[in-house]
Amino acid sequence: MFKILWSIFVTCILLETPVLSQNKDLSTKWRVPTGHCDPICSCQMDGLYYSEGETWRRKNEPCTTYRCETDGTIATTGKGCLYKNECKQVNSTWTEACNTFTCIEGNAVSFYKLTEAGCSTAKADCLRVGDQIEDGCNILECQMNETTLSLNIIKTGCSVEDACIDIGSYWHDGCTIFTCDNVNNTPVSRVLLDEVMQWPEGNYALLKPEAGCPNDVPGQWTEGSRLHFSTGRNYFSNPLTLHGNYSPDFMHHEFCIHGTVSSKPSTLKYKTYWEPGSYCILRRKGNCPRGFSDGYLMFDDKERNNSTVSTTSGDLPDGDYGPDTGLYFCCRKDGSVHTPLVLPKEENFVLFMNKGETACQNVRGMDHSIQSFTFNGESGDKHQHRGQVPSIRIANNDLTLQFCHYSHKGCGCTDESGAFIAAHSQKEINCTTKKCVSEKGKTSLEIVTGGCSTNGTCKMEGTTWTEFLGDTCIKKACIRVIDNGTIDFEIDESPPGCTDGEICQDVGTEIYRECFTSQCTLDTSANISMFKVIKADCPWLETCKASNSTWEHNCMMYQCDMSLVSGQYKWNVQPVGYGCSDGKGNCYEVGQNVSGPCFEAVCTLNENKTVVFLDVQKGGNHDY
């Protein structure tokens, strides 16, 4: 046993024996690694010894694990990357805030790098660089600016009737033209007053409505007509708002032909374009406008005789105008009929309903109705069609063609009294100023100022005043009343009060004047108010004396007598005590003698008890 321990000790000594530097300078200090011997030190790194099987990490490589092998070698058992105080394994990936990272093993140390970057949306979704999303009328794209990722708006517009209008575009609501402007990088709808819109450029034709052809640019529209005959059983929708002559025996179509003019209009006009949708127009000069495909429809006219001669006049759409009538159409089906087009609002017009559709193409700010005519041709179903044509139906020699008649909406508002107010204008009606607001194809009335009409004058909302009707007065105020969302203005009246000069006193108010106490009283049966005396005092000189009170004046005693007769107060001041004054502030009772240096007198009361005086019995002049 001793030998074994000695062997271990020797081994440790040998392992820990210092090594002299190669220059064998005896002054060189011994370099002895620190560490431990537990019991054999087989691996050494950074001045520390590690036992067989022991694992450790270096301070500067906290995510790399080392292990001491049995043969004294050091093995790497785990490598990783330090990311926010957490070790990630080599070749692992992780995502944070739409950014993806990967831990990569390098020649010396492991490191992580960004392998995929992204942008976070408001809904916490992640987009890769170049991905786009829609947010209302904004289109946002994930973009990298140098080293920064951000979601940037690459397209924006104005929201109108659940649709997005591009900046710089124009539209109308049937009454007013609007444009979408960019104000401080924000799309804003702006009203354009007293201006008109221009029909799309190019060559094409429309059926002429009863109201006539458009006239947006002088000289750009011309007209023409085609008369052709049937076998006598034509029929039509009700109403049929086309210009021309339509009867069971013939149809006399009239057309509006759009061409080009060299001179530009002097008045500012905003262009419109044939926008995507599902509708048809008539072809002119051999080509359809961009976005349309052409088609052909032939009516099998009645064979001619002396009384049935087809005729044409003026400018016409592309077609055949011989024994039969053929028309070329331009149709498109690249959008929904529910997505509104923008076309001029100034005049009524006609578009053809596209084949397969059951509804008219929506046009912003315009009302429309589906109409049709049915042409009764020769027997044998000889009507023909090819290519892209409008909505038709061919049966029993009859050819039915459907179209849509568009009319502009009423450009204004009508209030409950029937008064009309033009869009974007205001008018005073019954003391209330109302404004007609038109927005997104809808009109509504707004109250600018409100008032109440009384005695031929207007009282503004919140005004108070008093009307005097004799003894009765009424306090009034003009107030706003809302009933089921409808705003009105009414006169609010307080209960009748009593007229007090220029003041209207409330019922129950008491006033004291000229020795009388009066109270404002309401007669509910007649609904009138007036002051009634409820208490009275006796007037005395410039004062008032209470009922039944007594007082002295010039050696006399007086009393206020008050009575109520037939609802009226009767008052009387009665002397109740008599006396005489000598003029020097002295009083004497009736019958009392009064004497002085030059006289003798008696205080006397006359028989009627109305006068009391000093009756001189003896003497002469005196100064009383």
Image: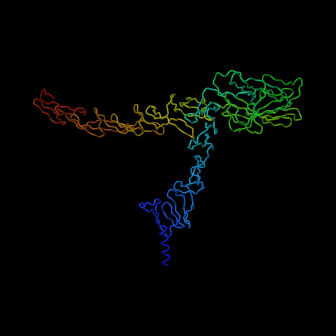
Q: Position of residue 520 (x, y in %)?
A: 41, 38
Name above or below for residue 402 compared with residue 262.
below
In-front residue for pair 187/110: 110
Quadrant housing the C terminus: top left
In-front residue for pair 320/39: 39
In-front residue for pair 481/443: 443
Quarter residue 344 falls in: top right
Q: Position of residue 317 (x, y in %)?
A: 78, 27
In-front residue for pair 620/248: 248
Q: Residue furthest left?
A: 597
| Residue at 48% over, 61% down | 47
Q: Is residue 511 left or right of residue 9?
A: left
Count of numbered circles on the image: 0
Q: Is residue 366 left or right of residue 4?
A: right
Q: Residue furthest bottom?
A: 1
Q: Position of residue 43 (x, y in %)?
A: 52, 64
Q: How was this image coloured?
A: rainbow
Quarter residue 543 falls in: top left
Q: Position of residue 124 (x, y in %)?
A: 58, 49
